[in-house]
Image (spheres, grey):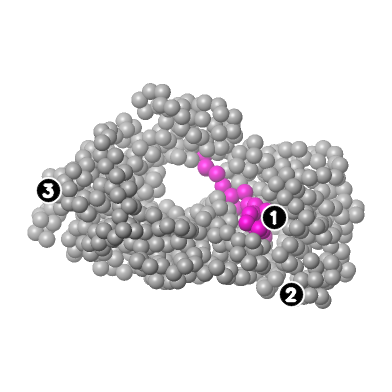
């Protein structure tokens, strides 16, 4: 420890008291972890993977280190301004300049460094900066295993280059402003943190090879400048971004022995790791933002700090983190994917992080999260248990996750099962969508009623489509999106769910009941009441293409709230009810209990040119009872209303009569549901 104590005296920029920590390495691995890795790569099943890993590192060593002349841009700006689709990078046309290609019409775009929203070249440069950070980490790993100095020398070269260059990159935000919240290498503290973490892990792995002068230069010029002076001063609350910042600050503290940074990362009562777990993780384990992409993004942030703390004698592997790993495997669709709720696309629950989760918790359920097939990830190589159980093929069945607001109905076996999720929980903060009582329906290996999910935030479609109520399978009132709200579960059973959307509009109540009559047939009873006459639009999006649409007239639609992005909109009355079908065999049948205008159109998919069938059931008044079915086997099932009152409705579908009471609330039926098919 003598050399380390001397180092602390040589670091005038450090303000934190020296922490009592073990020798390096202590972040990605401790000495015992390095020895386990050395033993593992000698085994026949792991040797080829190590050979490939080292080979990729050796290939990078052959390249000259040349840091970009300027900082990175926000990757969300890397979209076509016309179609909202993510660009692809074409050929390089000059030093640090490329062609950028729209995947929709293949137009070639060029960057404009004077405009953040058009600085496409700096978006590509973002990847170069991140690649160097990963190279520091990976060369450090190979050095620890082999002891060959060339790997440590490469890490040193990159670290010193950034230590000299870091402060010369101007502070800038995603909009080019020089203010707190921006970064030097990247355009926000989030991306600065994501970049700094592997830098710290790699520096730790080669720290003992560095001279005292190198350590001072790297500590002051890079790590303290980034962690203390750039990231730490940007103070947020409970948020996925703050978890990345905590890990970057905490790893810097653990690397340099700065107790103040360590405490800020772990114990800050408003934003530290412990506060994030206590306030950000729902009782069911789901991250509060309600977007599965951000759930795993948060896990990707916290494991680095938790594992480093463990190596340094502090156990942060508590129950909240274990629940975070449990929630995805319990709430996933039968194909192992999670729905595209809030600001997220669909997410594969099979994630390399479960190698670490199983190794630390030994929870058999985590086997469902392990990637299928051979275990070839870096997490498997670095942390994986010698043996893991096979995944349980039995599905969890219907379940209601009240704290996060997911009511899931499930019938059938394996990936061919039918799965429906009603979404009624908390809004989700800045990443939430106005979509209470929205649902996603999955059947026979695919999503048949999708959610709009999200796309790069620089795309105009993100605000104009993804984050409007019309883009979801839910209710729109008077052509305006819902307010932020938290709904609640009113009744739940193995085959039914009833949820209240909450305060989505002043004076409006929306109660949705879904009944899974069979694997092929779902009944919906949607009851809407208002304090004055309103226009109710019940929207639904169906995967596929419209088939044999009833004749209609051109529809006049509002110019905003998502309606402006609809195409081929037609409208017709439905005095006798109506059946709509798509080419996949999915059919919707609406009962003829109230005057309805049925609007059909196409909405937005992955881009403005990717079209998804959309139906809107429009009614006007102070109350509406929508009674409709979804058939998944190509056999439409028209529901018939047997009895209706202000607090209950009885519906006959096939041989089943289902009574939905919103006053009790309850769902009951008079015939075996399996007789409906």
**Decide: marks 3, 1 in contact (CB < 8 A)?**
no
Residue 95 or residue 215, whichever sits in front:
95
Cα distance in 3D space between marks 2 and 1? 21 Å
Q: Residues within 10 Å of mark 3 (few under 14, many from 20)?
A: some
Above or below, 534 relative to 75: below
Q: Residue furthest front?
A: 44
Element carrying mark 3:
helix
Q: Which mark is residue 490?
A: none
* Quarter occupied by residue 4: bottom left
Magenta part of the chain: 433-458
Q: CA distance from mark 3 to mark 1?
A: 62 Å
Task: Give the alpha-carbon distance from disc 3 to disc 2, as whole Å.
Answer: 72 Å
Main SS of the magenta part reads loop
Residue 448 painted magenta: yes
> Is 374 or 656 nearer to us in this picture?
374
Residue under numbered circle 3: 212
Give the secondary structure at mark 1: loop
- Mark sitting on residue 666: 2
Disc 2 secondary structure class: strand
Sequence-first tag of 3 and 1 = 3
Membership of 434 in magenta stretch? yes
* Residue that appears at 66% across and 67% down: 412
Q: Which residue is mark 1?
A: 474
Residue 442 occupies which quadrant of the picture? bottom right
Q: Is residue 482 positioned above or below 661 on the image?
A: above
**What residue is rendered at 35% in x and 54% in y?**
378
In contact (CB < 8 Å): disc 3 and disc 2: no
Q: Which residue sits at x=51%, y=30%? A: 101
| Percent position of residue 271, x then y | 39, 60
The image quadrant where one finds the C terminus is bottom right
Give how far across and how far down residue 530 sits, in percent.
77, 59
């Amino acid at each position: 420890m003598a050399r380390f104590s001397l180092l602390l005296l040589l670091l005038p920029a450090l303000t934190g008291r020296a922490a009592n920590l073990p020798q390096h390495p202590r972040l990605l691995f401790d000495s015992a972890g390095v020895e386990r890795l050395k033993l593992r790569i000698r085994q026949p099943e792991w040797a080829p993977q190590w050979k490939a890993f080292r080979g990729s590192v050796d290939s990078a060593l052959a390249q000259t280190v040349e840091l970009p002349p300027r900082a990175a841009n926000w990757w969300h700006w890397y979209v076509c301004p016309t179609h909202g689709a993510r660009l692809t990078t074409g050929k390089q046309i000059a030093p640090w300049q490329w062609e950028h290609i729209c995947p929709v019409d293949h137009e070639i775009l060029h960057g404009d460094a004077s405009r953040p929203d058009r600085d496409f070249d700096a978006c590509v440069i973002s990847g170069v900066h991140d690649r160097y950070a990963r190279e520091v980490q990976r060369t450090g790993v190979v050095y620890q295993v082999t002891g060959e100095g060339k790997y440590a020398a490469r890490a040193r070269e990159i670290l010193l280059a950034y230590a000299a260059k870091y402060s010369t990159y101007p502070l800038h935000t995603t909009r080019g402003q020089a203010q707190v919240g921006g970064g030097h290498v990247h355009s926000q503290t989030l991306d600065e943190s994501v970049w700094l973490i592997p830098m710290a892990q790699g520096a730790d792995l080669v720290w003992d090879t560095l001279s005292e002068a190198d350590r001072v230069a790297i500590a002051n010029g890079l790590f303290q400048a980034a962690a203390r002076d750039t990231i730490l001063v940007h103070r947020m609350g409970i948020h996925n971004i703050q978890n990345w910042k905590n890990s970057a600050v905490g790893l810097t503290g653990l690397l340099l022995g700065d107790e103040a940074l360590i405490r800020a990362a772990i114990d800050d009562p408003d934003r530290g790791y412990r506060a994030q777990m206590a306030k950000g993780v729902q009782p069911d384990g789901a991250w509060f933002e309600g977007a599965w992409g951000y759930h795993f993004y948060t896990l990707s942030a916290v494991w680095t700090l938790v594992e480093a703390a463990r190596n340094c004698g502090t156990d942060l592997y508590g129950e909240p983190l274990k629940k975070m790993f449990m929630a995805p495997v319990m709430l996933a669709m039968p194909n192992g994917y999670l729905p595209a709720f809030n600001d997220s696309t669909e997410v594969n629950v099979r994630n390399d992080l479960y190698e670490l989760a199983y190794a630390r918790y030994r929870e058999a359920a985590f086997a469902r999260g392990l990637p299928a097939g051979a275990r070839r990830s870096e997490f498997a190589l670095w942390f994986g248990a010698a043996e893991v159980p096979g995944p349980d093929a039995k599905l969890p069945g219907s379940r209601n996750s009240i704290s996060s607001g997911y009511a899931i109905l499930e019938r059938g076996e394996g990936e061919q099962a039918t799965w429906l999720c009603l979404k009624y929980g908390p809004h989700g903060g800045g990443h939430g969508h106005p979509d209470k009582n929205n649902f996603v329906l999955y059947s026979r290996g695919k999503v048949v009623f999708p959610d709009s999910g999200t796309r790069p935030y620089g795309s105009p479609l993100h605000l104009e489509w993804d984050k409007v109520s019309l883009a979801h399978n839910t209710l729109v009132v008077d052509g305006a999106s819902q307010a932020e709200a938290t709904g609640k579960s009113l009744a739940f059973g193995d085959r039914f769910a009833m949820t209240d959307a909450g305060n989505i509009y002043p004076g409006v109540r929306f109660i949705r009941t879904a009944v899974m009559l069979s694997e092929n047939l779902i009944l919906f009873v949607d009851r809407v009441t208002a304090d004055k006459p309103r226009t109710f639009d019940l929207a639904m999006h169906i995967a596929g293409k419209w088939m044999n649409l009833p004749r209609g007239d051109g529809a006049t639609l509002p110019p905003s709230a998502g309606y402006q992005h609809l195409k081929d909109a037609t409208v017709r009355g439905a005095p006798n009810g109506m059946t709509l079908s798509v080419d996949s065999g999915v059919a919707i049948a609406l009962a003829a209990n109230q005057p309805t205008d049925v609007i059909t159109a196409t909405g937005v998919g992955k881009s403005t040119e990717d079209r998804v069938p959309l139906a809107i059931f429009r009614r006007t008044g102070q109350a509406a009872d929508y009674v409709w079915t979804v058939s998944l086997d190509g056999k439409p099932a028209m529901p018939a209303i047997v009895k209706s009152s202000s607090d209950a409705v009885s519906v006959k579908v096939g041989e089943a009569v289902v009574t939905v009471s919103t006053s009790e609330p309850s769902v009951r039926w008079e015939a075996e549901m399996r007789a409906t098919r």
